[in-house]
Amino acid sequence: MGLVIPWSFTLALLDGYAILTKFPIHQTGILQVILLGDSVLSVLTLAAGSSTAGIVDLLLKADVSFCPPRFCSRYQISVAMAFLTWFLLLISSLSNFWLLPSLYTD
């Protein structure tokens, strides 16, 4: 999950640079790199969210309480945010995948 924030920040800077310089970001090579990065991070985010959800479920259903309710609620919120991040990265990846063939027809 530590890769998602720098990746998103870099893409935001790239978008800002493209707007200021009127540089067309929709080029085949750039879009392929963005598509690959979004796809890899989407799979890694799903894996992180799923593994964290499994650990939280194990901690909550254990006979002896391994975590105070305050910490378990924080873990549950982090799992929800991981799945939200995965969903948004998946949407970004699929929209870029949908846009990619249109660059080859021009």
Image (cartoon, rainbow, N blue to C red):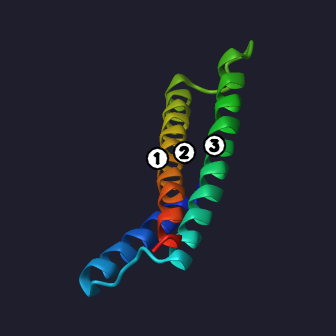
Amino acid type at image mark 3: Leu
Q: Is residue 101 placed above or below 80 in the rendered structure?
A: below
| Left or right of residue 2: residue 20 | left
Residue topped by disc 3: 46
3 or 2: tag closer to the N-terminus: 3
In 3D space, how far apart are the residues under numbered discs 1 and 3 (Cα atoms)?
A: 11 Å
Which label is found at residue 86? 2
Location of residue 50 (image quadrant)? top right
Label 2 element class: helix
Amino acid type at image mark 2: Trp
Q: Which residue lies furthest to the left in this view?
A: 20
Q: Residues within 10 Å of mark 3 (few under 14, many from 20)?
A: many
| Left or right of residue 61: residue 77 | left
106 or 39: nearer the eye? 106
Amino acid type at image mark 1: Leu
Contact, mark 3 vs mark 2 (Cβ under 8 Å): yes
1 or 3: tag closer to the N-terminus: 3
Residue topped by disc 1: 88
| Left or right of residue 46: residue 102 | left
Label 1 element class: helix
